[in-house]
Each structure stands twice: as structure tokens, then as C-alpha cells.
Amino acid sequence: MTEVELLLPDGLEPERLAAAVASDGFELVRADGAGQAHRVYYDTFDGRLRAAGAPAVHVGGRLLFDSVTASLQRPLRRVLAEDLPAGPLRETLGPLIEVRALLPLAALDVSEQHLRVLDAEHKTVVRASIERSALADSGAALRPRLRLAAVRGYDAELERVRGALQRELGLERSATGLADDAVTALGGKPGGFSSKVDVQLHFGQRADAAAVAVLRRLLEVIEQNLEGTIEDLDSEFLHDLRVAVRRTRSVQRQLKRVFPPEELARFRAEFKWLQGVTGESRDLDVYLLGFEDMRALVPASLRDELKPLRHALQTRRAAVREQMVSELRSERLGALRDRWSALLDQLQTLPDHDRPDAAEPIGSVSARRIAKVYRKVVHEGRAIAEDGPSKPFHELRKRGKELRYLLELFGTPLYPHDVVKPMIKTLKGLQDVLGRHQDREVQVATLSSLAAALPSEPGPLLATGALIARLDEDKWAARADFGRRFGAFAGHEQRQLVKETFT
Amino acid sequence: MSRVLAVYNIKGGVGKTSTAVNLAYLAATGGARTLLWDLDPQAASTFLFRVKPKVRGGPRKLLRRRSDVAGSIKGTDFKLLDLLPADFRYRHMDLALDRFKRPRTRLAKVLEPLRSEYSYIFLDCPPSISLVSESVFEAADALLVPMIPATLSSRTLDQLEPLVDRRGPQILAFLSMLDLNRPLHRELLHRLRATHPSTMLGAAIPVADEVERMGEERAVVASFAPTSPAARAYEALWLDVRFRLSNSLPRI
């Protein structure tokens, strides 16, 4: 169905609208169903629904998205896909929002007056409504709008009606939806917040300036995800926060020669602390998010016996989160943010006698780093024995992450896509195997440590034991995949390409 | 689950269009997404809903498997009720069907993609027995057969029943233009119910000015005379039809 929204000047009478459409032979009449409505618009923090069309809206005890609805008695502080009743809305939203929560964007009180536009046969061809809305909290009024929707098969008539209204009354077409206007009026940002870095760099830019541009954006990502992490709105806040911290630390290491060494050492310690205090919470999130998949690993007859394990994970998560939240609210973090931001502001003005790479072009500094870390990954990977100890796998994984961040943050904006993209892809293939190996190992250790918290009945212990055995098996399966993935990443052709590109 | 309901009788002037538009209206206002396909080149249903009786490309294009049937659908004044309009060229529908390898399954194929969008699809069929009606029998889940109270009415059922084989649509017949003050009508009603208990519905449509006024008002009875006996009778008929549909056993 085609829809158009026009902005109305305050106090415009419907009679003037009627006269305008009459100029093209249409008749405007009142329709039933005028009334007041309280609307709450919802979207994920990163604006996924708006990107897919428009935010969801809660009105009259139902949540509506893309003409699919489900019953939801009260507007909630957050709505996860699993909070919705099974049905078409959950099926539509689930794949879009995944683990993200729908959060209220804005609440509006809207008065609607419904109208119909008839053609010469007195047939309804366009449904119209005048919407007068105000922010529910402050009562601040938004610009009234006329919403026009073509009856199916009458798009041409809608265009004529819109044309007549714009021609006769000079009405403006609304460039943004009502939800966007409300978000803007509340001081928010329509479309939400992305955690992508996407910073423009150029090859000859001073390395310290490029580092500041990337690190400033990463600090922004950390800060924008802090509140959602503390409030536990969904698990992606903590995830995105941790990725930004890890990337920050990676840039600190890889471009250390653009910073004054003593100050950098202090900040590296502080960011390490921040990474540390958020680690266990994230691990537990991962267990709980993947619990159904883990359940599927044990024999069907034992699956219900995993309930106490889930409960133990939830209990530990709550305790660990409490600790994390108090650290995230601490003055220590506040001071870290302020001081780090101040350093980024000043960095380019600091003397560079102890910052040998500061004035170098970022193109050559990053090429050197990418080539060097790549060589190290190849070297360390070659030394790995499939049935050897775990440590070299973990070390290689860390090194691989370092390379991946370099490629994403500096490789993508500065080097040809047809080199960087496939390189990231094969690296990702390798990292997936190493990640699975690492995850399984940590999971086996965590679950074993939880055994004491389980009831001392045979069922839960047996089930947890079976799960541990399957996870351990999968760890070895990941090792068996390693050789192939590493081969793709460290082959002769790839090594040549790296040598030629990053010099 | 989507249901295709064809309003059909070999004879004309028995109240097919009135039945189709009033029941389609009741289905839609009851909350079900509903489509009415006006297959009759006389275009009476199309006229009642004030839609232009024209389909781009005519029946030939409409019947082509990949043609955009959905693009020819028009919304009516009622939110959940859409119309696939009639076209004067539907008078050549037999010829258009005959060009296909399996003409009898053609309508069912055209309707297939619409079944996911609509809960009810009503077919307002032209009177006659032809390739079009055979294609309708193949596509429909039920035939709604309005009959005028005449002694020959039972012949309609006798003729229809063998045409629709065991795997064909359920037949739901009822009397329209019924005048219970006339002994002949009363007697006929009782006789038909006795002789065709599984096909004759309990509901019937009375002879009423409101039904005739539909053409003048260009509206369904329920919208301009909601409390009239005719409006009530259509409601009872729709209830009866839904009851029979929900109780129908799968045919073997």
C-alpha cells in the first residue's frame, strides 16, 4: 500500500483540504474511527526496524510492525523476541532483531481524525487521517500531519490527490516519519546508534592524527554502550563495549610509537582493567545465549536434567554482573574516560621527540604493522602441532585478532578492497576455528567448576558430564579443522600478496 | 486456512451476486482478509463496489500462470475486502481457458498465490455450465448454490451433484427470494431439506425490497439497512456456511 505524509500548518481546517481535492474532482468526507491514542515507538538501539522500513509501534494493547501485530498489554521497558507471543509478529521480528531488545524510542499522545477521499463514482480511493501529536512526557506539540494511504489499486488517484493538496495549499511532503520527529524532539538520533567504526583516513595523514580519529570513535562506541550494559537491556551492549575496548587496546599496542610512552603505559593498564572487569559477564552471556545449542549436544533423555545447570549459570551471572556494574559506575572508569579523551584531544600538539611514528604517514606505519603481524601469525601457526598443548592455539588466536583489527581499522580505509576483503575472510575462517577451540576449552573449565553448585543427584551431574564430554570432543574437532583453514590463510599466493601490498 | 467459495447456479437471476457481495462483506467485517472475484462479464458485483469493470490484458493475461493477478486487485471501501473486477472480455473466458493444456485446473493455479493472502476467496460465477464452471469446481472448496423456490429447483441439485465428483467441492445450497407466506414455498423448503439433508442449509434469504435496492444504493444490505430481515438472513447464512465448512470432513 502506498502512503504519503504531508505536513499541515497549525489550525488548518479540513474544509480547506476538501476544497483542494475538489479542484481535481475528488470529494473528501469524514470517516468513522476518530479518536485519541497513546503510541509508543520501539526499535533496537542500532535502529534495525527503521532500517527495515519503520519502527514498531505499541498502540491500543498491541505491538505493530509492518502491518503484523501481536497482543502486548502494556508498553514494556524492553521487549525481546522471546517476550512476544508465538505468532506472525514474533516470526517477522525475530530474524531482524536477533538478540537485540526493542527499546521505547518515544511516547506520543495522538489525536486522529479519519477521512476518506471519494472519486466521481463515490468510491473510496484514498484513506486519509489528520494526526495531531504531542510528546507524552512534556506535552510539546509536533507539527500536525496528513497521512494519505491509497486503497489497493488506486495509486494513481493517490498521486493526483497529493498533487492537488500540494498545488492548492502549498503543503510540504514530510521527509521524515512521525517517530523520527518525536525522537529528534526528544534530543535523540533517528536511526539509532551503530557500533561500526567507519572512519575516513587518507594515506598521507599523520599517524597520530589517524590514531586519534579511530580511537575517538572507539571511545564514542564505549560510551554509547555503557548505559545499556549497566541497565542490562540486551547482551549486545556489553558485547559492543568489549569489542571497542579490545580494539582500543590493539591500536594502543600496534601504534604505540605515536604516543608518549609513559602515559600510554598508564592507559594500557587501565583499559586492561576495563577489559578484565567485563570478561566473565560476557562469558556467562555467551553460555546462556547458546544454552539451547548446548542442550542439543546431550542425549534427549538427559536434556531436562540441565535445568539446574542453567539455573547455576544464571545465579553466577547475576553475581558477576553486580560486581561489573559497580566497576562500570566507579570513579575509576569516569576518570579513565575523561583523561583518555583529554589525551586524544592533545596528542597531535605534544612534542614528538619520544613519539617516533607520530609524524609518519599512516599509510606506511599501518603497512609495516600489517606485514609484521601477518608474518608473526604465519610463523606461529606453522609451529603449532594439532595434538600439542593448547597455549600456542590461544596465542595464535590473540595474534590473529590483532591482525584483524589492523585490517579492519586501517586496511579497509587505506588499501584496495580486493586485497583486504578476501584477506579478512580467510583470516575470519581461521579465527572461527581458533575461537571455537578456545570457547570449548573455557566452557569445559567453567562447567567443571560449576559442578559443586549443582544438586548432588545423579541426573544433573550425568547431564553436565555428558555435555562436558561433547564440548571436549568438539574442541578436538576444531583442532582437526585448523590445518585446512591455516593453509588457506598462509598459502604462498596470500604471502606474496601481503608482501606486494603492505610495503 | 484459506477457503475458496464459489457462488454458483446454472440459472441466472437467482441471487448469486447478492449472496457473493453480502457474504464477502460479512467475512471481511468479521476480521478475515477477503477477496471477491467477479467472474461474470455482466459485472454486477463490480458495479456494486463502484469499481471500473476492467482488467488490464483481459482474461487471457489474467490466466497466464506468471501474470500479475495481484496487480489487478482493487481495494473496496471496506478495509479487509478486495475485489478482482469483472471485465466484459470474460465472456470469452472459455476460449481463453481452452488454450491451456489442462484448462480445468487453470483457475486453481491462478488462485494459488492468493490463498496465502486471503482467508476467504469468493467467486461470483456467471450462470451456465461450461469450461469456466468446470474450472471453478476444480478451484473451489465449496459451492454456494442459491435457488429460487420453484418446483424445478431440486433438479438443479440433481444435475449438480453428479457433475461434482467425490473429490470435488462441498455443495451448500439454500433458497433465496423465499416468501414464507406462500404455502408452496414452505412446502418446497421442507421437501428440499428432507431430500438433500447434507447439501441444503438451514438458512434462507427472504424476498425483500432491500435486496433489490442494492443496485440503486450500490452498497451491501448490511451497510444501508443493517437491521432489516434481509441483512439478518445473510448473517444467519454466513454463520451456517462457516459452521458447515468447519464441520466438513476431508474428502477421500
Image (cartoon, coloured by chain):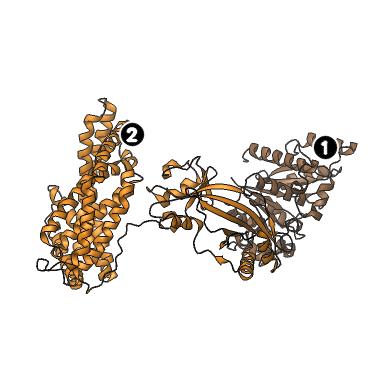
Chain colours: A orange, B brown
Quadrant that contains the C terminus of chain A: bottom left
Residue furthest out toward the top: A457
Give residue A63's position: percent from left, percent from top: 50, 46
Q: Report how many numbered discs are placed on residues in the image.
A: 2
Q: Residue at x 81, y 37 (%)?
A: B192
The image shows residue B243, relative to residue A274, as above or below, that is above
Secondary structure beneath dot 2 equals helix
Calculate the distance from the C-alpha at mark 1 to the C-alpha at mark 2.
63 Å
Q: Residue at x 53, y 63 (%)?
A: A174
Q: Which residue is mark 2?
A: A303
Q: Which residue is mark 1?
A: B189
Secondary structure beneath dot 1 equals helix
A337 vs A246, nearest the viewer: A337
Q: Mark 2: few, some, or many residues within 10 Å (few <14, many ≥20)?
A: some
Badge 2 sits on which subunit? Answer: A
A33 horizontally vs A240: left or right: right
The image shows residue A140, relative to residue A410, as above or below, that is above
A170 vs A498, nearest the viewer: A170
A373 vs A55, nearest the viewer: A55
* Residue type for callout 1: Leu
B224 horizontally vs A271: left or right: right
Quadrant that contains the N terminus of chain A: bottom right
Give a yes or no on whether discs 1 and 2 share a subunit: no
A129 vs A285, nearest the viewer: A129
Give residue A187's position: percent from left, percent from top: 41, 56
